[in-house]
Amino acid sequence: MAVLEIVGVTKRFGSLLANDGITLSLDEGEILALLGENGAGKTTLMNILFGHYTADQGHILVRGQILAPGSPDAAIAAGIGMVHQHFTLADNLSVLENVILGRESLWSWRQDKTRGRDHILKMARDFGLEVDPDALISQLSIGERQRVEILKALYGDARVLILDEPTAVLTPQETASLFETLRRLVAQGRSVVIISHKLHEILSVSDRVAVLRRGAIVGTVMTADADRDSLAELMVGRSVVRPKAEPMEPGDEVLRFHAVSLGEAKLDAVDLSVRAHQIVGIAGVAGNGQADLANLISGLARPSAGHIELFGETPARLTPQSVIAAGVGRIPEDRNAVGVIGAMTVWENLSAEDIRKPPASRYGFFLDAPAARRRAAALIEAYDVRCKGPDAETGLLSGGNIQKLILARALSREPKLILANQPARGLDEGAIAYVHERLLAARARGAGILLITEDLDEIMALADRVAVIYRGRLSESHAVSEVTVPELGLMMAGQQSERPRHAV
Amino acid sequence: MRFEPRERVSVLAATVAPVAGVAAALLLCSVLILWTGESVVEAYWLLLKGAFGTKFAITETLSRATPLILTGLAAAVAFRAKFWNIGAEGQLYCGALAATWVGTGLLTLPPVLMIPLLFLAGALGGGAAMLVPVVLKNRLRVDEVVTTLLLNFVILLFVSYLLEGPLKDPMLMGWPQAAPIIDEGVLPRLVERSRLHLGLVVAVAAALLVWLVMTFTVWGYEIRAVGHNAVAAAFSGININRTIIRTALFSGGLAGMAGVTEVAGLKGYLTLDLSPGFGYAGIAVAMLAQLHPIGVLASALFLSAIYVGADSMSRGVNIPTYIADVLVATSMLAVVLSIMLARYRIRFN
């Protein structure tokens, strides 16, 4: 029987139709996957369900009863628990304190920690969510924090658990453990909604898949009857094939790190080599030093020990200007906050890296807006940036189009080394395929590419060699053909690979 | 209740919004006027007449607007880069001090050279006052709000010391006042038998120049880029420290020029009451103008009209001149609010 029914839910934000008459039901003991690209309306729908937003039309039934709209308290009382994409834990409190936060009576003098602890330990045993109730959140790994989030959501005896992109920050092993927990939950008669855009995960964990596209349900299929291609086509609306790298003979070395360290073990004696016609993937869980590595190559940080060789020379000083001038193209991790200035126009952003040179300016001082606009118009055309034109405000562009703008700026100068930091994160399938094609085209042209990513599929598809970064240390690199995804996963979790090393 | 950004804000809405805000402020303040028992219509009529009613009133309003334009530009330029210069008052006095030093006998040149020299000296003086805050910010990340604000008091006390000591005009029996600017350096009157002087032309030209620099040069581009998103600006290769230094000197220089218009145009000599808070009022001018250099011209005129008009109103009806401060403050809040309404749409779930 249905524990949860969403009936005709519609939600608009201004002119954007985020949810368009969505009707969906969740059965008891079922894992329902909500699949869709970024911006398809998945998170909006779950936020309506949990009371963060109010639907313009439609309503939600929990066991046949109408759920009061716009009230997370009502949703919790009705037995709905939500695990948000971004963790909502207080770092300075213990696991126990986080879980019972907000669940206690206002009128009791002291927290009843004993009862809370017992309850947490019981849930942890029942569902395979081992975590020390007295540990501080700040001491926990990302995977453990997520367990705390789930415990928190389940604490009030939730019957329906909603997880928004729960695997985005997990290693493959942590993901497998999460799915085991979810299976135990449904085995005990609870129901789970999991939001994702990762097809293989959905295929492995869910019972049924509902596919959202542009705010509407475009199909609901039993997972047993679905496969990767059919789901991808439903999600994107057309068939999209991500490109794969063809083998290629590497050329001269374009980047070399000689025992580079940064700060207090942010990076520890990192050796690294990238050659022309070569893509080197850096795999790792977020926060293990990727940002520092990228900052060094972007010219935003300087090594505290060791040195960096660019195109066979050791520059005296690395600054953003000097690395750009030397021939490095940079795709930053956070495209909205670092890649572009949202309040400025498309042409101003496209000119940002060479504002003191023609065509952007004359004599290094007077802006040449007409010439810069003409170049911007040509780049918009060449890189298929969907916008109203060079004078459009950049912040209004979609994530995929902002990334295309950054690609246009970085790649149009034909850089010899490309730093691609999470180049496809959060993009839809079409845009991912586009970014990958552009990177492969640059490699074919002779660029060396350092690809930093958490997405192992991306590394397997694009990279020639791969190294894993863990707590500021970089492993030796391996040819991609000689490693498997589970092996990389273990290394990402800090365990040395058992198999013999393949030297560089 | 939530705010949703509008997809597009028409030029008309963007221009009407501040005007509507000012109208709302006048309406709100009429409650205060009613409270005193006077007629609202008469009070506002007297205010308007006091600001623009006679040739004398107009020249007074314009001469009051002159330093406000320059301090308003100082704030507008700095705030564009999100460099919060609250020290225009001190920089104004530094500019006046530099003009006094150069203009009271250090050297004598014909007016065509002397007057530009005084403005140059004033701009350098105002810029010099920025050096300490900007070095502290770039080297040690010291908040410029604190340093520029507190420097105002340091500078004012220093000027007070100079006026009591080294700079005191020996011809005056004990008044803390510097020697007058030599005749070659005094800004000529624009209108006979009024206090309106050449400084207004300089201020308007400065507004045009600032607009040109902000819109058509790499410097302006960099100032805007750093203000909107310093992280992205640094990533794309803009030197943040250098941009901040340039912005700070530019801003301090403009405030310093306000000191020159007062010392060489309005008063003729340096005293401790040279500025009744023009530096601080410049912040209000810049905010009302939404940091647009040309808008600064309009908002400086508005502020000075309120102040000059309120003086005259308080003489005509029984309302204290403090109504001017209330009007300006209410206008600022109302304009900020109306601009927000032009950009966002309110939704009640």
Image: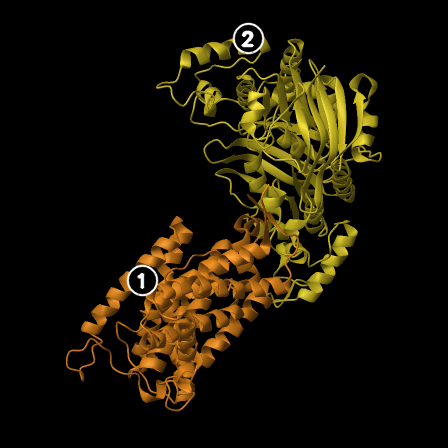
Chain colours: A yellow, B orange
From this view, report whether residue B126 is shown above or below residue B187.
above
Q: Crowding near pointer 2: few (<14 within 10 Å), some, many (20+)?
A: few
Residue B88 in sight from this viewpoint: no
CA gap between label 2 and label 1 equals 65 Å
Residue sitting nearer the eye, B336 or A408 = B336
Question: What chain letter is assigned to the residue under label 1?
Answer: B
The C terminus of chain A lies in quadrant: top right
Q: Going by the picture, which residue comes out furthest to the left? A: B173
Residue sitting nearer the eye, A62 or A255 = A62
Pinpoint residue A437: horizontal percent, then vertical percent.
Answer: 78, 40
Residue A153 in sight from this viewpoint: yes
Question: What chain letter is assigned to the residue under label 2?
Answer: A
> Can you tell which mark lies on residue B265?
none
Q: Amino acid at mark 1?
A: Asn
Pinpoint residue B48: horizontal percent, then vertical percent.
Answer: 43, 76
From this view, report whether residue A332 is shown above or below residue A98.
below
Pinpoint residue A492: horizontal percent, then vertical percent.
Answer: 61, 23
> Can you tell which mark lies on residue A125?
2
The N terminus of chain A lies in quadrant: top right
**Helix, strand or loop for disc 2:** helix
Q: Residue at x 71, y 50 (%)?
A: A408
Horizontal side of B291 relative to A453 (left or right) equals: left
Residue sitting nearer the eye, B333 or A8 = A8
Q: Amino acid at mark 2?
A: Arg
Q: Quadrant of residue B56?
A: bottom left
Horizontal side of B238 relative to A1 (left or right) equals: left
**Helix, strand or loop for disc 1:** helix
Q: Which residue is mark 1?
A: B152
Pinpoint residue A265: horizontal percent, then vertical percent.
Answer: 48, 31
